[in-house]
Amino acid sequence: MTNLKIPKSEIIVREAEEADRGESLRVETEAFERPEITELVDALLDDPSARPLLSLLAFHDGRAVGHVLFTHARLEGADRPATISLLAPLAVVPEAQKRGVGGELIRAGLEMLAERGVDLVFVLGHPSYYPRYGFRPAGVRGFEAPYPIPEQDADAWMVQAIRADAAIPARGKVVCAEAMDRPEHWRE
């Protein structure tokens, strides 16, 4: 399939429902071509420790072309309480990549999470991509990932405060959902 030309005004983002699970998993499979990512998403959707979660689909011409999942996490050892989520994974089908779909999913997700009272969102991702959406290195700010991030990838572990009125903790270790709590999920 050739690359789609997608004006941002033609991207529709909405919360995924249980009936959309097959479409969400199809997008993950096409985007990553790694069954372990699709299996992780499937497991997270069923994992009670990942809730509350936010699963969003992006559509173009009625077809799902992107998916993002935000799962519940908590901070251990924080100097003050905070409500946090993890962004993982963000998937866009190959023919729709570099067309703004991922950015629309991130923006919509952060806005919805802020409305739901989430203070911080963490991501382990490409350090040249996520800063475009307000993410900054988390380790230097005192936030540890669930598993150690190698020094050469330290700036791939990022955080964003999404509520201006929140009292943000200065440190803490992120404890993620059980389905994601394995070292292999924490390598960039």
Image (cartoon, rainbow, N blue to C red):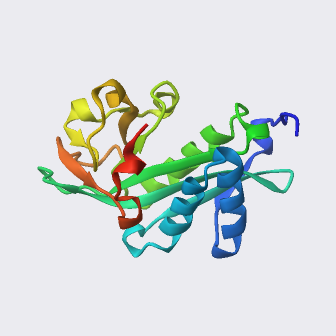
Q: Is residue 64 left or right of residue 171?
A: right
Taking 7 as reference, is 115 left or right?
left
| Numbered disc total | 0
Q: Is residue 33 visible?
A: yes
Asked whether, in this view, residue 176 is left or right of residue 56, the answer is: left
Snapshot quadrant of residue 25: bottom right
Q: Is residue 137 or residue 115 the one in the foreground?
A: 137
Q: Can residue 162 be seen in this snapshot?
A: no
Q: Nearer the viewer, residue 22 or 20?
A: 22
Above or below, 112 relative to 93 = below
Q: Where 119 sits versus 7, above or below? A: below
Tell me which residue sits at (53%, 51%) in the image: 109
Residue 183, compared with residue 73, is above or below; it is above
Q: Is residue 41 left or right of residue 118?
A: right
Q: Quadrant of the C terminus?
A: top left
| Residue 41, image x, y percentages | 54, 61
Point out the image quarter for the N terminus.
Answer: top right
Residue drawn where x is 41% and y is 65% of the image: 179
- Residue 6 point in image, percent of width and height: 81, 37
Place of residue 113 in the rendered image (x, y in percent of width and height, measured from the top left): 46, 55
